[in-house]
Image (cartoon, rainbow, N blue to C red):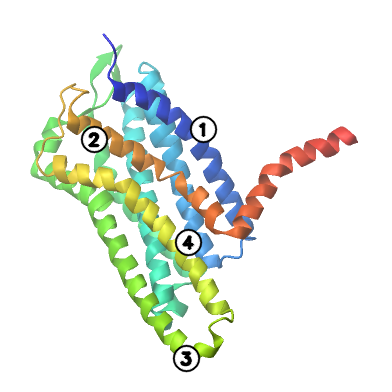
Amino acid sequence: MARPTILQLREIYYPFLAAFGVPANLLTIVILYRENCGLSKCISVYMVAMATADLLVMIFNVIVHHIFTYHFPHSMLSYTAVCKFIIYINATSLNMSVWFTVLFTVDRCVAICCQKFKTKYCRVRTAAAVITTVSVLIYCQCLPFWFAYKFERIINNIHWGCRPSIEFFTSPAGVGFSWMVNVLTSLFPFALILLFNCLTVRRILVASRARRGLRGHSSENQSDPEMENRRKSIILLFTVSGSFLVLWLTPFVSFLTTGLTNTAHYRGDYKAPAYIATETGYMLMYLSSCTNTCIYAATQTKFREELKKLVKSPWTLIQILVKK
């Protein structure tokens, strides 16, 4: 009997995703850390945080969980303690990837819409403090995952496997925790990004009309450095947040249709539409952890130049060594 198409697809999809996502995020971190892209230090801090969180998603959620654990079910990764750790770190890395995107959107909204508050908020120290605080809150918020799963079987006095604890998930605390995770991972961030982008768009339209009026019609053909810098910043913001919204739309809708109606239990039916929709949502969701590098390369000229230098540098070094 042929295996379900969705299972065959995920066995091909996740290795390709990891092969691209890990080096892409590593290169992004290195390039942004060198600070040669012409971006402000505050923006670079948020972008490095986003790339680091995306790298963790690639390593733990994709490679460890969807590749190693899936293909090697009887390895040490199946020890209950290790399995619980993987589930916990998967949840924290995914949450950080989501919320760092929200923080980046908030920072750009403040920089464009709140000129008086900008000098206090859009600073490297503030960005580091906000990122650290949010990270600690995420690690604390995900602690119940340690108690939400228990062992599947005992072999030679060793606990193997992880399965959801019925007692936990049917308790009022477990039900509340499940809703909190779904809301904080998809619903709330989705709404915040939409809200702050709408505020940013509104501010941009008002400021552009006012600036055109001040400059007058006689200077329409002259370049405006301030508007050009603002345009580049806006393009970067909208492409990053827009990519996130598009790729998270499927898991967001899946949560609304299956999570709210409690129909997300498939009982091994891999051809069920709800299961296929959920798995497709996961694939697109993890793809969002690879797209930022492509966005930076497409929208930022200096980032693209640094990327070319970094990619060529190992080959240049080899050529020099061969000639010598």
Which residue appears farthest toward the top when viewing the image? 1
Q: Would you say residue 208 is visible in this rendering? A: yes
Placement of the C terminus among the 4 image quadrants:
top right
Instruction: Report which residue position mark 1 lands on.
Output: 19
The CA span between labels 4 and 2 is 30 Å
**Label 3: few (<14), some (14–19) or many (≥20) C-alpha neighbours in 10 Å:** few
Residue at screen point 60% across, 56% down: 303
The residue lying toward the viewer, choosing from 149 and 290, is 290
Mark sitting earlier along the chain (1/3): 1
* Amino acid type of the residue that numbered disc 1 sits on in the rendered structure: Ala
Is 179 situated left or right of 100 in this image?
left
Mark sitting earlier along the chain (3/4): 3
Instruction: Report which residue position mark 4 lands on.
Output: 236
The CA span between labels 3 and 4 is 26 Å
Q: Position of residue 2 (x, y in %)?
A: 28, 12
- Label 1 near label 2: C-beta < 8 Å? no
Say which of marks 3 and 4 sits in front.
Answer: 3
Q: Position of residue 251 (x, y in %)?
A: 26, 43
* Amino acid type of the residue that numbered disc 3 sits on in the rendered structure: Leu
Residue 233: numbered disc: none
Residue 277: numbered disc: 2
The CA span between labels 1 and 3 is 51 Å
Residue 214: numbered disc: 3
Placement of 242 over or under 9, stated as above or below: below
